Image: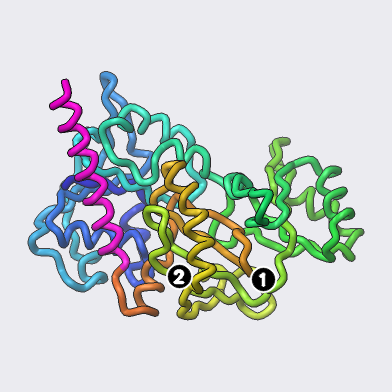
Amino acid sequence: MKICFIMYPWESINPRRDSSLRLVHECVRRGYDVAITNPSNLTIRDSITYSYCQTIVNPDRVSIGISTFHKNCKFKRGMRELQEFDVIFMRDNPPLDPLVLNFLDSIREDVFIVNAIRGLREANNKIYTAAYYYPEHEIIPATHVSKNIDYLLKVIKESDSDKMIMKQLNGYGGSGVIIVEKSAVNNIRSLLEFYIKKSNGESNYVILQDYVEGAENGDIRVLMLGGKPIGALRRRPASGDVRSNISAGGSIEKYRLSSDEKKFCKKIGKKLVNDGIYFAGLDIINGKLIEVNVLSPGTITDINRLNNTKLQIKIVDYLEKMVAQIEKAKENEITKA
């Protein structure tokens, strides 16, 4: 199988923690033709989409140790036609440049892309989570997305809660997540202006979300594959911080989903798969869906360590299954023709 990872620079990887490195290593271990590239390397020539890739050489000599593999990995560098790959795995950090999806549009019928272009377009930022509104079940906390300061002030003033969560629309890793106290009425406008107004005269969208009781105890990160949960952990914020993200200083604990939580995840999973989102991370607090992470969900390494497992095996098995299904469907089409 041929697979290309569109991701951050190889040199920036922290071997001890990086999830993408585990996926690359598993593919190389299986003897795949594995290449990595960066979104900035995409190009179109004569109506064909290429990328300047680093193709891993001597895959039969792959080291068992992740750190050694990362350090000693050898590459052959050069342009490759993206249509030659069976799988394109998007693993770059958010926010995603929409133009990247325009490049990939030309190959979407020929290559299995994780996640699908239509899914990435819909879920590229935190607005997507607001789509999980079901009248019969409040899956998400009340959520407002805007850059109208007067409107957001009104939302805060009329909220039944004494506090709300505010975050950047395109933030990740817990960056820019704060609690807005209703009692700090004299500071709220200044805070909104700081988050929304940019020095060049433009403005940013922000998200205001009802504060979910129990958030001070952290959240549950669930990794979803093919619409089903494959692993979870609890994240607890550092003292004096609202953010549970590990990159923001939070800690992690082993966690086993309850039967109700599994049903909750599977309900969400149906929409994920229908939207072309095959691999995602869910952030859940007290039965509420806070975020859906679709571009480069992490915590594979942490869940592996806490449960003595290797989620990358399940993920790559899934890729093999999907590629086999696509190839079989193509064969059936040829037979019918």
Specify the segment rendered in magenta.
311-337
The dominant secondary structure in magenta is helix
Q: How many marks?
A: 2
Task: Residue 80: tell me if it is visible.
Answer: no
Task: Residue 216: tell me if it is visible.
Answer: yes
At horizontal 33% and vertical 35% (from top left) the residue drawn is 42
Residue 247 on the magenta span: no
At horizontal 55% and vertical 62% (from top left) the residue drawn is 283
Q: Is residue 309 above or below residue 126?
A: below
Q: Quadrant of residue 103?
A: top left
Q: Nearer the viewer, residue 306 or 37?
A: 306
At horizontal 42% and vertical 42% (from top left) the residue drawn is 276
| Residue type beneath disc 2 | Ala
Instruction: Count residues near mark 1 (Cα–Cα under 10 Å), then give few for <14, some for 14-19, many for 20+.
Output: some
Q: Is residue 106 left or right of residue 201?
A: left
* Label drawn at residue 215: 1
Residue 329 on the magenta span: yes
Q: Earlier in the sequence, mark 2 or mark 1?
A: 1
Q: Is residue 294 left or right of residue 243?
A: left
| Residue type beneath disc 1 | Ala
Residue 122, position in %: x, y? 52, 39
Q: Is residue 262 left or right of residue 91?
A: right
**Is disc 1 placed on a helix, strand or loop?**
helix
Q: Whole-Å distance between the Cαs marked 2 and 1?
A: 17 Å
Q: Which residue is mark 2?
A: 232
At horizontal 73% and vertical 54% (from top left) the residue drawn is 142
* Label drawn at residue 286: none
Instruction: Count residues near mark 2 (Cα–Cα under 10 Å), then give few for <14, some for 14-19, many for 20+.
Output: many
Residue 37, position in %: x, y? 30, 45
